[in-house]
Image: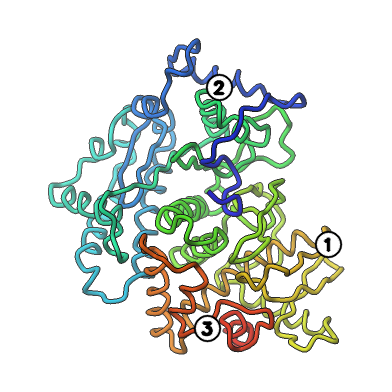
Amino acid sequence: MRIALLFAATLFLAPLLPARPDAKLDHQKIAKDLAIRLGIDTARPEDVTLEAVLAKHYVRADLGAFHVEWPVAQLPSRAKEFKECCVALVKCQETWLDWVQTKPAEQKAVRADLAAVLKWVSGWSVPNLAKGRGGQAVSEIAVPQPAAAEALARFNDALRRLTPIGTGREQPKAVKLVFAPTRQEFTEFCYFAGWIFPDLRPVLWLDSVPDWTQAFVRDMQVVALQYTINARPPHDYTSGSWMNERDPDVMQQQVVQLAMNGLFLDHYEERVPGAFVGGLSMNLVVDTYGVVNTRVDGDTRSKETAKREVFIPGAPSEGGFLSKNSAETRWRENHGADHFLPTLRHAQSDGGSEAKNEKNKLACFAVRDDAGGGKHVVRAPFLGSAAAETKAPPAQFTGDWTEFLRAYKSGFIHWLQTAAAGSEKASRERFATLLRRLADPNLSSDFEAVFQEVYEGAPLSNPDVDKNCLEGQFLRWLPKSK
């Protein structure tokens, strides 16, 4: 699992480390307190399984590619949010099918099933959901009609085998999402997982967990639905604010972006860089909701160290946090409704003006320091192995630089999808082909080679970012974009 995409706990095994002496939170006590409330014998954590806890204390929903777990304790008061999250998960898969469709006839059956599933989920009664019991499937609470139940079974099987996307797989596989609606539930779940999995303690028993957006525990993606609070006291792991208090759709956007990150990682595995995955999930949110007003990536000021990779080398870690009241940067003024193109154009124009002696001024962008007045010119390439030597700006420009990279990958992927092949129709067809090729589990080519195969020999980028590479073509298109 890539640190470039995932801020929190990952799937790797690490040696057991002692608790930090300066820890402000008693991770083990918080974990044991939860165990006691769940009726678990704390004397033998090795006998505890998350599967048993989920089976007794959560309700579950299978919705296409996703298997969802929701704490039953948060059904009486938050059944509405449970329903909204599930509707969002179905809708985003419809957008995904739009992206990878090459011939409408190929998806006719699965789209009919999706429509039936979406109608069923949208019709769930919130009062009835609130009465759900631990261990139930949502289909036992909101019982679908026989035709809808059959459509759900077919839809789940198709999305889990990847049959609508191209080369399928023999065994179905679901992306597992565990929702932790409150900050307290999220923190307790992470520390509880560290209690029963000692090898995960180095990445889960951390005082920063109450600020995280998500965590990974084995093959489960744990998603929080509350923001952390500004200036959180070190001992406070329960205070938070609901995402949808700020914007009616922002919770759904956040859920979709994080869930699609998980889906793309499942589809692409190690064949695709994390930064490309992050760009896809951002743009999918835009195509589903019209904006991407999430607090997942960009200037999160997380303390994770980014690794260099082959889409945006040196791109900062994604998956940190921004509190509800974080000041909006210039990059977030329109919440991504325009794929950040106007701000990218302005930064490009500004960079070209600042770089007096630069031959390729279209490759230059100006980023600003935290005070907003100082400028620093960064130069493409920013994509692919050609960008391996691209230097990040000085530390005082980190915030704007990370927001720039977030916008840049969104803008570039939008260009691939809508303009890279000339007409929008041809571009979408070629983009669908690219995504299908990358999802092929039998793919023998590397990530950049697939771009050359799909885009008639054009490499993803080159050191000169000239018109012969895709990044160079994007830079020449950007000033003329609408």
Please name the amino acid that badge 2 sits on.
Ala
Residue 29 percent across, percent down from the top left: 60, 18
In the image, which disc is placed on residue 458?
A: 3
Residue 479 percent across, percent down from the top left: 65, 86
Mark 1 and mark 3 lie on one chain; the one further toward the N terminus is 1
**With 249 as the anchor, is 320 left or right in this view?**
right
Q: In the displayed structure, would residue 379 be above or below residue 256?
A: below
Q: In the displayed structure, would residue 9 be above or below residue 343?
A: above
Label 2 element class: helix
Q: Whole-Å distance between the Cαs marked 3 and 2?
A: 53 Å
Q: Which residue is mark 2?
A: 31
Q: Are marks 1 and 3 in contact (CB under 8 Å)?
A: no
**Residue 397 is drawn in which quadrant?**
bottom right
Please name the amino acid that badge 1 sits on.
Pro
Q: Is residue 479 visible?
A: no
Residue 52 percent across, percent down from the top left: 36, 25
Q: Whole-Å distance between the Cαs marked 1 and 3?
A: 32 Å
Q: Are marks 3 and 2 in contact (CB under 8 Å)?
A: no
Q: Nearer the viewer, mark 1 or mark 3?
A: 3
In the image, which disc is placed on residue 394?
A: 1
Mark 3 and mark 2 lie on one chain; the one further toward the N terminus is 2
Q: Which residue ends up furthest to the left in the rendered image?
A: 146
Mark 2 and mark 1 lie on one chain; the one further toward the N terminus is 2
